């Protein structure tokens, strides 16, 4: 009879992605093998997974399992934890410790302090209080249901890769936690509306899909993406962002539109933009480059409330095409910017298709804003559109990938957080009669 893991498919995929899309091969199970850890020696890097009734706690060990009774040097491993079937909300903690096996018990010690121990014969896991606190897992009792050990196959040779991935996961989890808790600081607004505007093929729809993917824990492609000279998006669409497959909608909404085009009568009609900004255009409205929406249109929203308006405009530009923007396209952006400022709307620029963003992030997570604002392209765009450099960001969307990347997710979520913070700052500066009393209803 084949020995199978207790991990669900989604849980296993989350662990694989955590280490850079590796493969996991089950080596040993406490319910099947009497000497659990003996089967794991000389097998290379491993993940040891401990199952409680509703919690999973595990540890990654780079290199071989220690030989019983042999002394070992401290290594940089990491622990992880998550609630069953919520692997997308995984918490990780770097663990610098000496690893040893004594009487069949796997022990992690740091400065002679036992941080973690796993004893399969007694189905017992012990964890130092500081480590338990960092993992945000306060389990009742210490008897587990099962312990499994997996060999990690296909891990990158870069000896620092694991620490980089761990740091990325840490920042990503912090950003996810902050964005899940985000609320507009005006009671009349339940969701911040972010409108994406840019030339055809600049990456507007891809950014929407990328944000949704980061919260879903898997790649999603609800917004239709195209690369033709004509816009694939012909409707005005507003996309909610849900936290996980069965999660609630978060407090922001991404709005997609037709792409801008330098030629008149092609792409989004400039006369439609003021109506979109003011909240007069309904979801799924069919655009026409030759005929803008008017107050006489049956679909026109005549009295939009504050919550229906656009609260942030994100201009989306392919960073490789900045130098090739025609004077007509630049004039359109400046015309839109005048309307945006007139409406008191926050605005940012997203520079897409940066092939080295992930590499940049691997070097510097703590100063993402600083490392991203020293580029010549950002200064060029700032002068071109008269937008301050601190409101210009570089992102790398998901395009043809099949799996998520923690570095891309971290940058995407960071940019989203900055936009929402900017909107809250703008809302605080609005007149009280607008934020407290005006509802848009007669």
Image (tube, rainbow, N blue to C red):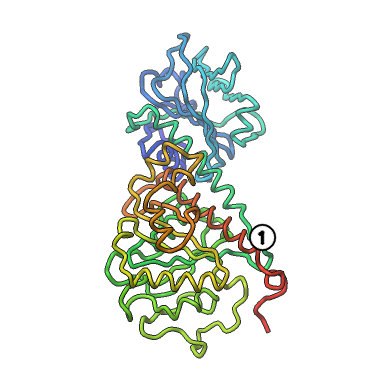
Q: How many marks?
A: 1
x and y percentages locating residue 145 in the rendered image: 56, 31
Image quadrant in which you'd find residue 291: bottom left
The residue closer to the viewer here, 109 or 256, is: 256
Vertical comparison of 121 with 229: above or below: above
The residue closer to the viewer here, 185 or 246, is: 185
x and y percentages locating residue 175 in the rendered image: 54, 47
Quadrant in which the N terminus is drawn: top left
x and y percentages locating residue 213 in the rendered image: 44, 54
**Is residue 135 among what the camera can see?**
yes
Q: Residue furthest front?
A: 383
Image quadrant in which you'd find residue 343: bottom right
Vertical comparison of 119 with 57: above or below: above
The residue closer to the viewer here, 340 or 278, is: 340
Please give the residue where the numbered disc 1 appears in the rendered image. 185
The residue closer to the viewer here, 288 or 371, is: 371
At 42% from the left edge and 67% from the top edge, which residue is drawn? 197
Is residue 25 left or right of 48 when viewed as pictured?
Answer: left
Quadrant in which the C terminus is drawn: bottom right
Q: Residue furthest left?
A: 228
Vertical comparison of 109 with 422: above or below: above
**Is residue 50 among what the camera can see?**
no
At 63% from the left edge and 24% from the top edge, which residue is drawn? 128
At 43% from the left edge and 58% from the top edge, which residue is drawn? 382
**Within 10 Å of the Cα at label 1, are there few (<14), some (14-19), or many (20+) other Cα atoms?**
some
x and y percentages locating residue 431 in the rendered image: 69, 69
Q: Under tag 1, what secondary structure? A: loop
Vertical comparison of 184 with 434: above or below: above
């Amino acid at each position: 009879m084949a020995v199978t893991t207790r991990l669900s498919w989604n849980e296993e995929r989350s662990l694989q992605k955590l280490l850079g899309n590796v493969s996991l091969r089950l080596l040993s199970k406490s319910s099947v093998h009497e000497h659990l850890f003996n089967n794991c020696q000389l097998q290379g890097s491993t993940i040891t997974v401990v199952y409680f009734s509703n919690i999973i706690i595990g540890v990654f060990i780079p290199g071989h399992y220690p030989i019983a009774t042999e002394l070992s040097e401290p290594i940089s491993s990491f622990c992880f934890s998550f609630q069953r079937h919520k692997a997308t909300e995984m918490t990780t903690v770097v663990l610098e410790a000496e690893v040893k096996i004594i009487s069949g018990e796997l022990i992690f010690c740091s400065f002679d302090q036992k941080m973690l121990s796993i004893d399969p014969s007694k189905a017992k896991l012990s964890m130092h209080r500081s480590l338990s606190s960092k993992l945000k897992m306060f389990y009742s009792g210490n008897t587990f249901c099962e312990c499994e050990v997996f060999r990690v196959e296909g891990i990158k040779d870069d000896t620092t890769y694991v620490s980089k991935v761990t740091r990325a996961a840490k920042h990503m989890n912090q950003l996810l936690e902050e964005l899940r808790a985000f609320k507009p600081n005006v009671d009349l607004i339940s969701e911040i509306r972010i409108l994406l505007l840019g030339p055809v093929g600049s990456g507007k729809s891809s950014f929407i899909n990328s944000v949704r993917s980061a919260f879903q824990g898997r790649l999603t492609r609800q917004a239709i993406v195209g690369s033709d000279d004509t816009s694939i998006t012909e409707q005005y669409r507003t996309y909610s962002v849900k936290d996980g497959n069965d999660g609630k909608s978060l407090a922001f909404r991404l709005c997609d539109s037709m792409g801008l085009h330098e030629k008149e009568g092609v792409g989004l009609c400039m006369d439609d933009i003021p109506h979109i900004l003011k909240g007069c255009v309904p979801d799924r409205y069919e655009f026409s480059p030759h005929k803008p929406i008017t107050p006489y249109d049956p679909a026109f929203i005549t009295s939009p409330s504050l919550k229906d308006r656009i609260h942030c405009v994100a201009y989306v530009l392919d960073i490789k095409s900045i130098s090739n923007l025609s004077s007509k396209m630049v004039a359109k952006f400046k015309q839109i910017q005048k309307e945006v400022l007139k409406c008191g709307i926050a605005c940012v620029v997203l520079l897409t298709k940066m092939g080295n963003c992930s590499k940049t992030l691997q070097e510097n997570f703590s100063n993402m804003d600083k490392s991203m604002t020293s580029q010549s392209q950002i200064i060029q765009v700032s002068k071109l559109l008269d937008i301050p450099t601190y409101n210009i960001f570089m992102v790398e969307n998901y395009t043809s990938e099949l799996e998520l990347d923690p570095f891309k997710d971290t940058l995407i979520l960071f940019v989203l957080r900055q936009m929402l913070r900017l909107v809250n700052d703008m809302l605080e500066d609005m007149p009280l009669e607008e934020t407290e009393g005006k509802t848009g209803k007669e």
